[in-house]
Image (spheres, rainbow, N blue to C red):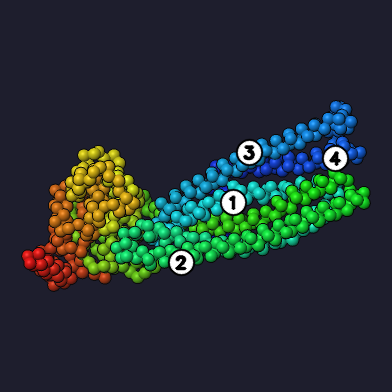
Amino acid sequence: MQQTQQAPTRAARWKRLWRLISGCRRFFFYTILATLLAVLTAYLSPLIVSFTVDSIVGEKAMNLPGWLQGWIDAIGGREYLAAHLWLPALAVLLVQGGNAVCAYFRGRCSALGGEGTAKALRDALYRRLVRAPYAWHKASSTGDLVQRCTSDVETVRRFLQMQMMEVVRTVMMALVAVGVMLPINPMLTAVACSLLPLLMIFSYFYSRGVEKHFRMADEAEGAMTTALQENLTGMRVVRTFARQGQELEKFTRLNRDYRAKSLRLNDLMGIYWGASDTLGYLQIALVMLVSVAMAVQGTASLGTVMLFSTYSSMLTFPMRQLGRILADLVKADVSLARLDEILTAPQEEEPGKALTPPIRGRITFENVSFAYPDGGEILHGVDFDLAPGRTVGILGSTGSGKSTLVHLLQRLYAPTDGRVLIDGVDIRDIRRDWLRRHVGIVLQEPFLFSRTIGENIALGDLSAGEEERFEAARTACIHSVIEGFADGYDTMVGERGVTLSGGQKQRVAIARMLVQKTPICIFDDSLSAVDAETDAAIREALLKRDTGTTILISHRISTLRGADTILVLEDGKIVQRGAHSELSAQEGLYRRICTIQNELDETAKGGEAL
């Protein structure tokens, strides 16, 4: 994807995300609260068991808070609890039940926060995409954008929903465990924490390795998604040129690259989990060895041994998750950086006055020049004035700037010099959506949605009635063809219109524009896929219908000869202008093309006669 500005810092990216998810922040706060309660209840059970072994079954003095000691004394003290051991067991069950309830709410709130984040991200990304300038989209890969809006969003969601809460849980478990163990036995506490610094250092270096390899794997997945998207949308071309083998080889190569980079991530994970398992079990063994030795010497009770053995496990294995948390953090940061390129993409703005003037169709180009940001100048001092209700034809070789004129008229690009006016108003001062609502266009390669033919035509004006859609289809010479389909206007169009021929797609797109009833109609070589007879029929139908000001861009002289004025472009300049009768009598590009096409037509007729 083309970089349009300096990449935001990591802090800026996360602040932007935090602002974006304002509607679901409360769920994360609820999750943190449920996590804290779950940690506290998880540590209560070993304490109850240790207290039961040492101070109820055993003879160790009770060392309890005053309110709890008073409650025990009120029911009969140690003797009563020793005779009713089901009470400590019930306490353990109640604590575990509370832990289960907290775990449930933690999972539910975390899911609500995570899914809310994903929704907010997808909505924000789509808003930015639909408002990004045309030039930005041309410089971006569709497959890569799809991968960012799916896989990268999922990576961020998974971290916020799962691993961010694990950070809270890990920190709380460490603090509570140390806070409980330290007053009981400082020496055993030091032993229980002795290997944790080593585990934290190991986790840090593991996360750094993950960051590098995850970025490589993510980019490889984007390249693979792009290849898949291009092949699915261009399947007709792939089959036409029998390139299935080459495209399969290309996809296999990209898939192999993605697999190799993903395996490197898995290798790192395997090394980390193996080493952290070893450190974790070594920590537990060390605690048990020291605590048992102290119990034999009489410096630690049996309950203390049980308590520290349990706490050591509860402390070590959450800390072991630290590496995974850090790894998922850097993955989320890499994904967020890729998403941020969309979230900070430039947006179409209204630099002018955002006027909504009545548009009748007078088009004026005043000394217009244009150059693409990454290329040379395309148009040089283009001047012409087209009165409302007239038709102008534009002829020129490939790359002469014909389609660029259309892009400027719809404000997909802005002139680098000069002005474009409609009815005397600079189009930069006309509100963009208002302008495009009044300037209809049919491209050489029209896009049809995966809907019925009738729905595709109705997109021009959703309020148009059935008869209006039929009339537009008749003008486009497609009505009888549609009626010939088994389902008529309810016939489903395949993705990008693949179930229709090129000419049928162009005519459906023409009908869609005609339904819109725009005062300015542009046909950008949009009759190239129809035969000459249908071309003539469509032009004749357009002349009978008040379609407003019309711009015809074509390579066919037969398509342009009926225009009021024909502009001939060469190297971005207007080299000839006039009616067909004038231009065909002048020396120049128009006459040469006219002569060549006439000779080709005569040759074709001669071949048919033979």
Q: Residue 600, how many percent across, how many down?
A: 13, 68
Q: Which residue is mark 4?
A: 53
Q: Which residue is mark 3?
A: 105
Residue at the spot x=38%, y=60% of the render? 230
Label 1 neighbour load within 10 Å: few <14, some 14-19, many 20+? many
- The numbered mark at residue 253 is 2
> Which callout, 1 or 2, points at the residue further toward the start of the chain?
1
> Which callout, 2 or 3, points at the residue further toward the start of the chain?
3
- Tell me the quadrant of the picture where the N terminus can be found: bottom left
Label 2 neighbour load within 10 Å: few <14, some 14-19, many 20+? few
Identify the secondary structure beneath mark 1.
helix
Residue at the spot x=28%, y=68% of the render? 399
CB atoms of marks 4 and 3 within 8 Å? no
Q: Nearer the viewer, residue 273 or 402?
A: 273
Q: Nearer the viewer, mark 2 or mark 3?
A: 2
Please, what is the three-letter code of the amino acid marked with disc 1? Answer: Phe
Q: Nearer the viewer, residue 202 or 124?
A: 202
Give the CA distance from mark 3 to mark 1.
18 Å
Does 543 appear above or below 561? above
Identify the secondary structure beneath mark 3.
helix
Q: Residue 187, how many percent across, how many down?
A: 86, 53
CB atoms of marks 2 and 3 within 8 Å? no
Label 4 neighbour load within 10 Å: few <14, some 14-19, many 20+? some
Judge from the rendering whether residue 398 lies leftward or rightward of residue 254; answer left or right. Answer: left
Q: Residue 540, how many percent across, how many down?
A: 13, 52
Please, what is the three-letter code of the amino acid marked with disc 3? Answer: Phe
